[in-house]
Image (cartoon, rainbow, N blue to C red):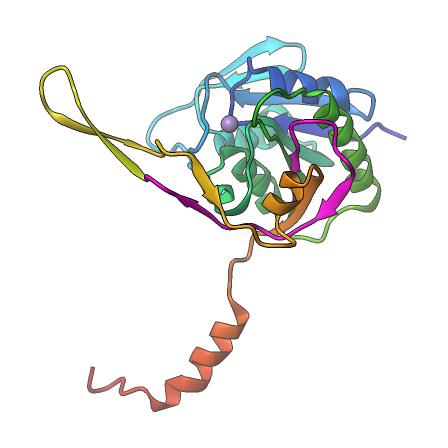
Amino acid sequence: MTPPLILVSNDDGYHSEGIRVLADALGSLGEVWVVAPDRENSAVSHALTLSRPLRLTQLAERGFAVDGTPTDCVTLGVGQVLKGRTPDLVVSGINFGANMGDDVHYSGTVSAAFEAVILGVPAIAVSQVIWSEFSYAFAGRFARLIATRVLGRGLPPGVLLNVNIPPSRPKGVRFTRLGKRTYGEGVVEDTDPRGRKCYWIGGGDPVWEDIPGTDYAAVGAGYTSITPLQLDMTDRDQLLLLDSEVAAWDLEGS
Ligand code: MN
């Protein structure tokens, strides 16, 4: 039996510690290839580079850096580096910092995994929550465990697993839904050396709503959180409601 083909990417960059830990942890499970951004790309979401060509730089036998986004990396990983061979699994991470709740929409880590899902490849995103001291050791071990499960049982089309590892030794695992975060001070105003106003986004500490069953609640209680996420963001209830209303809409007069 051929060993599983595993593509690893991230948004912190090829040279980050987290992706080393992840690639090493998955090494015993199959043939691991790393295709990652050549520099940090956190919070770039699902951006795809269409306005310029991309460079693919080989840095190891199975390691490549791309001067692009995490989505570019998965696209080039599947379409060029592994050309002709479809990976059995894509794992993104281990991100330096949580990717929970609303933040999954900004996350390059989660978007790299979603890109794999779009390409029909099962995917996992792994993030290390950092509140004070932390170690990647638990995250590496857990990534291997959950990768083994997904390689064995697969995932439904359109679904990925978003994993967040607590800062200290996890008490166990909780399966969760996305939490809710509010930024207290979303915009911080400053003045640049030339006297012009400038602004920082995300300056304040994030404040989380304490909602039972969420990723934040699980990690806050010391557990590893696993949230199944789906690519299809259609709200089916609203779809039915709108459909039931449309006959009464004045479409001609508007
Ligand atoms: Mn990151």
233, 51: nearer the viewer: 233
Q: Quadrant of residue 185?
A: top left
Q: Residue 55's x, y, as percent?
A: 45, 18
- Identify whether 233 is placed above or below 251: above
Specify the farthest residue to the right: 1
- Residue 79's x, y, as percent? 58, 32
Residue at 82%, 46% (x, y): give it: 153
Q: Position of residue 125 (x, y in %)?
A: 63, 36
Question: Most extreme residue toward the bottom, as rendered?
Answer: 248
Q: From the viewer's perspective, is residue 63 above or below residue 225?
A: above
For residue 117, above or below residue 13: below
If the image is split into quadrants, where does the N terminus sit?
A: top right
Q: Quadrant of the C terminus?
A: bottom left
Q: Position of residue 63 (x, y in %)?
A: 62, 15
Q: In the drawing, does residue 152 fall left or right of residue 246?
A: right
Query: In the rendered image, is residue 122 in sight?
Result: no
Residue at 53% across, 46% down: 101
* Residue 198 position (above or below residue 216): above
Residue 13 seen in render: yes
Identify which residue, 253 or 137, lies in the foreground: 137
What's drawn in magenta, residue-wise? 161-185
Magenta residue check for 173: yes
The residue sitting at 48% across, 47% down in the picture is: 102
Nearest the viewer among 175 and 132 is 132
Q: Is residue 243 left or right of residue 88?
A: left
